[in-house]
Image (cartoon, helix red, strand yellow):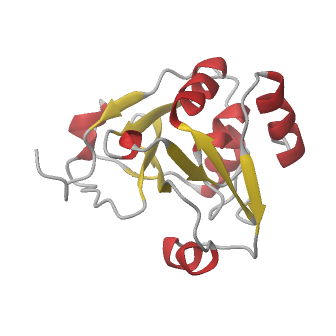
Amino acid sequence: MGKSVDELMQYLGDMGIEVSTIRHAAVFTVAEAQNLRGQLSGAHTKNLFLKDKKDNYFLVTVDEDAEVDLKTIHSKIGAASRVSFGKSEKLLEYLGLTPGAVSVFGLINDTQHQVSVVLDEKLMQHDIINAHPLTNEATTSIRREDLLTFLKMTGHEPLILKIDVATPN
């Protein structure tokens, strides 16, 4: 069983990371989240839990408006083959998350480092990044530098790459 929202908040607090969290009705898509969030500043994320044929897993986090080419992303992220979406059982096992609640905060549960994390460079241009805090019934705002600190403290060194194919070179 993965950590709870309260345990995540305690972990962040213990690291001196300040976040703000708003509660809302459960959302399962970017469109639903856009309708609910009001005027939260900063970037809002879209998260892809992917795997290659050798069972290497990746969490790719991009801006909600990003376009991701699943046919070519494998060559960017170092996958052994083309990728597909990881099964919900592995999502729960590795990140302690269910579909709809996928976010970088799930990496707190990946203590065996089974998942590589990839952040889109366009997303990382924002000072504030918003993501689900282990539940799709809330959104947490975190500073970019604090997100990187969180990832490193969980043992995940993120790759920051150009993933959004809609962004010109």
* Above or below for 37 versus 60: below
Which quadrant of the view contains residue 100?
bottom right
Residue at 36% across, 41% down: 125
| Left or right: residue 84 compared with residue 143 | left
Front position in the image: 163 or 130 = 130
Which quadrant of the view contains residue 70?
bottom left
Mark yes or no: residue 55 visible: no
Residue at 58% across, 33% down: 147
| Position of the C terminus by quadrant | top left
| Left or right: residue 121 compared with residue 166 | right
Number of numbered labels in the structure image: 0
* Above or below for 88 versus 59: below
| Position of the N terminus by quadrant | top right
Front position in the image: 14 or 99 = 14
| Left or right: residue 61 compared with residue 16 | left
Front position in the image: 77 or 18 = 18
| Left or right: residue 159 compared with residue 92 | left
* Above or below for 123 versus 87: above
Front position in the image: 18 or 77 = 18
Residue at 67% across, 31% down: 110
Q: Position of residue 30 (x, y in %)?
A: 50, 71
Q: Position of residue 162 (x, y in %)?
A: 25, 40
Q: Position of residue 161 (x, y in %)?
A: 29, 35
Residue furthest toward the left? 169
Residue at 45% across, 47% down: 61
Mark yes or no: residue 22 visible: yes
